[in-house]
Image (cartoon, helix red, strand yellow):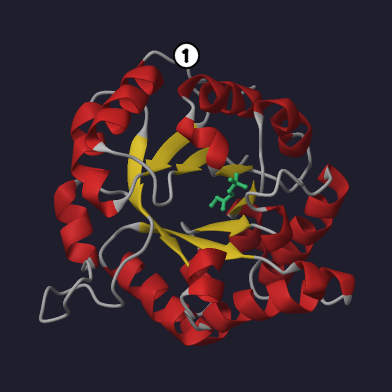
Amino acid sequence: MRRPLVAGNWKMHGTRASVTELIEGLSQQVLPADIDVAVFPSSLHIAQAVQGLSGKAVKVGAQDCAAQVEQGALTGELATSQLVDVGCEFVLVGHSERRLILGESDEAVVRKFAAVQAAGLIPVLCLGETREQREANTTLDVVGGQLAAVIDALGVESLSGAVVAYEPVWAIGTGLTATPEQAQEVHAAIRAQAAHFDAGVAAGLRILYGGSVKAASAAELFGMQDIDGGLVGGASLNADEFGAICRAAGN
Ligand code: 13P
């Protein structure tokens, strides 16, 4: 059985004061014991979140990292060893906002994925198609290609212990959620692609859905066979809403 994971991506939001408030709100949530929960604050607020959530069942991750473990002369970047040092357990890799707005290539994503694992952290590899790509019926090719970049470079074993997040770009921050059936189709294809190389790795791979997940839509999405939790943006900035999404993932 795969243990569900609900992750909150806070993106470029928050001040010290609002993060304090959000942490307090999260600390009061009743969270299911049979799922993992993680939040991804901005880099500025990672340490604050690690400290504020210590002793709680909420882990902390980073939204991005450098493509190297070692510290060094790379202005503005964060080495994965530094993320370990500050108390991170996860790192988002290849979020569509970084791929599409900041021009992050598959090659860069692969290097970051490797650096995350080399540091002993868990990568959350984000995949997803744009609206144009979906309308052109190329969704499975696009997502499959993004996944293949990692499998080809690092081997399917690299997915063992990793997390994949399917986030259709057209559903991010738009209020448009993929239907459970649309999401399930892509999740099943991702798992089948991994199973082609290693059935055991595929069976254990957690595949999260992201894109306008709300408490109202979570239970139906998480009820699908190959959806193992969610990567939540906007709704994760509200502790009560995020808590309700987490509870929808519990048994
Ligand atoms: P929204 O939940 O705001 O659509 O964002 C999804 C996302 O990009 C999470 O990484």
Q: How many numbered callouts?
A: 1
Q: Residue at x 66, y 54 (%)?
A: 203
230 versus 133 height, above or below: above
**Whole-percent x and y of residue 129?**
71, 69
104 versus 120 height, above or below: below
Residue with the most extreme left position: 72
Q: Residue at x 70, y 32 (%)?
A: 218
Q: Is residue 143 left or right of residue 244?
A: right
Q: Is residue 182 left or right of residue 166?
A: right
Q: Residue at x 21, y 68 (%)?
A: 79
173 versus 144 height, above or below: above
Is any part of residue 133 visible from this angle? yes
**Whole-percent x and y of residue 176?**
76, 47
**Whole-percent x and y of residue 162?**
48, 59
Q: Indicate the quadrant where residue 55 lies.
A: top left
Query: Which residue is denoted by mark 1 in the rendering?
Result: 30
What is the secondary structure assignment of the residue under circle 1? loop
**Whole-percent x and y of residue 158?**
47, 70
Tell which of 120 and 20 is nearer to you: 20
Q: Quadrant of the N terminus?
A: top right
Q: Residue at x 71, y 36 (%)?
A: 222
Q: Is residue 40 left or right of residue 19?
A: right
Q: Name which residue type carries label 1.
A: Val
